[in-house]
Amino acid sequence: MDRQAVLSLIGFAVAVVPVTQILHRVGYNRWWAVLWFLPLINLISLWVFAFKRWPIDALQPTARDADQWSDADHKTFRKLLNERSL
């Protein structure tokens, strides 16, 4: 394997691994990272992700809702967050 191929693989890993981890943590499938390698589609997906409601947002309380939560709700919320971060 020549030097340029090795550097390309390293660059690919440096770009893909963090993106896949971020996508997984916010509740999206890791295969969305493939879109970053398709010209123009990557820009469209960036705008979609920037303004779309993320799956993890459904688990997080808003400031308005926080006062209405019981202790059991807070425990359930913490449990769900811990499960999703694993």
Image: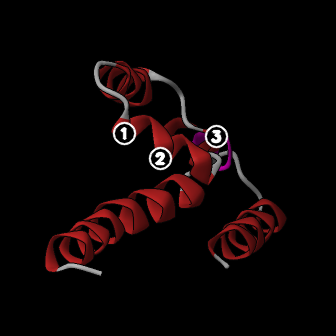
Q: How many marks?
A: 3
* Residue 67 percent location from the top left of the image: 60, 48
Image quadrant in which the C terminus is located = bottom right
Mark nearest the camera among 1 and 3 is 1
Q: Secondary structure at mark 3?
A: helix
Looking at numbered disc 3 in the image, what kind of residue is underneath it? Pro
> Cα distance, mark 1 to mark 3?
20 Å
Residue drawn 67% across and 49% down?
59
Q: Is residue 17 visible?
A: yes
Q: Secondary structure at mark 1?
A: helix
Which residue position holds label 3? 55
Which portion, as a residue range, is magenta? Answer: 56-60
Answer whether residue 3 is magenta in the image: no
When asked about the image quadrant of residue 37, the answer is top left
> Cα distance, mark 2 to mark 3?
17 Å
Looking at numbered disc 2 in the image, what kind of residue is underneath it? Ala
Query: Callout 2 environment at 10 Å: few (<14), some (14 to 19), or many (20+)?
Result: many
